[in-house]
């Protein structure tokens, strides 16, 4: 069992370029005006925010060990503690039960597949099928991982329905139960509104 308390920093920049287009469907474009009476106005805005994100509660149980595959069951509960208006969180609570299928080869290489279903408590149209495929390579002290993160949202419009993200991470166990983790995520498709790069620095302690 564990708890994750994220400290999130978000920087946001938006650019807009509007035009008035003459067409048969718009024969009188002169009735539309912009500030300063410009036909091609350009505007931009930016901002940033820092604070506590959505706190995550997690639990995992080892269900099966075999020569072919190891199976674990897990549950993630993401609380809506982050400020959604400043993009620090999603503004809702979700529960995600999932299965983890993995197998370690030569004590250094571990491919894995995660399959789960996420239920958003107060927004049913955000329920989604979640999946992860990737591998970890390394020792107990130092590990690198590469993953494909996927999400298919049910009962949703086409925008943001299918998300694909690439993830590259490194974990280092300098001493005892302390673990330092660095991760980078980049979108692999154009679906949804997402950052071009999401970086994470984490500190874990187990007891």
Image (spheres, helix red, strand yellow):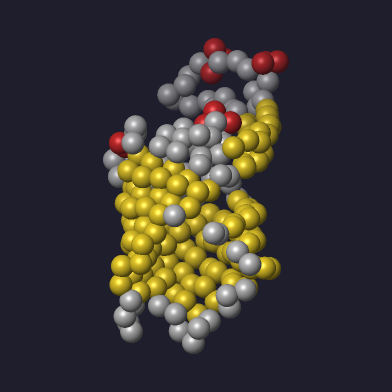
Instruction: Count up the numbered dots.
Output: 0
The quadrant of the picture occupied by the N terminus is bottom left
Residue positioned most to the top: 31
Residue 61 can be seen in this image:
yes
Q: Is residue 130 visible?
A: no
* Residue 203 horizontal side relative to residue 129, left or right: right
Q: Is residue 134 left or right of residue 62?
A: right
Viewer-side residue, 200 vs 179: 179
As drawn, 119 above or below 170: above
Q: Give the x, y percent position of residue 6.
A: 58, 44
Examine the rendered structure and indicate whether residue 134 appears above or below residue 74: below
Which residue appears at 35% of the width and 67% of the height?
62
Locate residue 188, reporting x and y percent: 51, 58
Tell me the quarter of the picture where residue 51 sits: top right
Residue beneath the point at 56% across and 15% down: 32
Q: Quadrant of residue 103?
A: bottom left
Q: Is residue 14 above or below residue 152?
A: above
Taking the image as shown, residue 8 lies to the left or right of residue 123, namely: right
Along the line of sight, the residue nearer the viewer: 19 or 14 = 14
x and y percent of residue 44 in the render?
Answer: 68, 30
If the image is split into quadrants, where does the C terminus sit?
bottom right
Closest to the observer, 161 or 127: 127
Q: Residue at x 47, y 76 (%)?
A: 110
Whole-percent x and y of residue 167? 54, 61
């Amino acid at each position: 069992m564990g708890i994750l308390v994220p400290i999130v920093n978000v920087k946001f920049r938006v650019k807009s370029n509007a035009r008035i287009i003459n067409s048969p469907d718009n024969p009188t474009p002169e009735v539309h005006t912009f500030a300063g009476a410009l036909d091609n106005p350009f505007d931009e805005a930016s901002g940033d925010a820092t604070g506590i994100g959505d706190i995550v509660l997690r639990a995992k149980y080892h269900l099966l060990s075999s020569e072919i595959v190891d199976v674990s069951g897990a549950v993630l509960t993401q609380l809506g503690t982050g400020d959604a208006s400043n993009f620090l969180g999603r503004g809702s609570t979700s529960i995600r039960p999932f299965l983890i299928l993995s197998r370690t080869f030569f004590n250094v290489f571990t491919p894995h597949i995660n399959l789960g279903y996420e239920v958003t408590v107060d927004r049913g149209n955000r329920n989604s099928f979640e999946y992860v495929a990737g591998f970890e390579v390394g020792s107990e002290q130092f590990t690198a991982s590469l993953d494909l993160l996927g999400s298919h949202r049910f009962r949703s419009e086409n925008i943001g329905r299918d998300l694909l993200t690439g993830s590259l991470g490194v974990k280092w166990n300098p001493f005892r139960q302390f673990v330092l983790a660095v991760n980078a995520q980049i979108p692999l498709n154009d679906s949804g509104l997402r950052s071009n790069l999401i970086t994470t620095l984490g500190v874990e302690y187990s007891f």
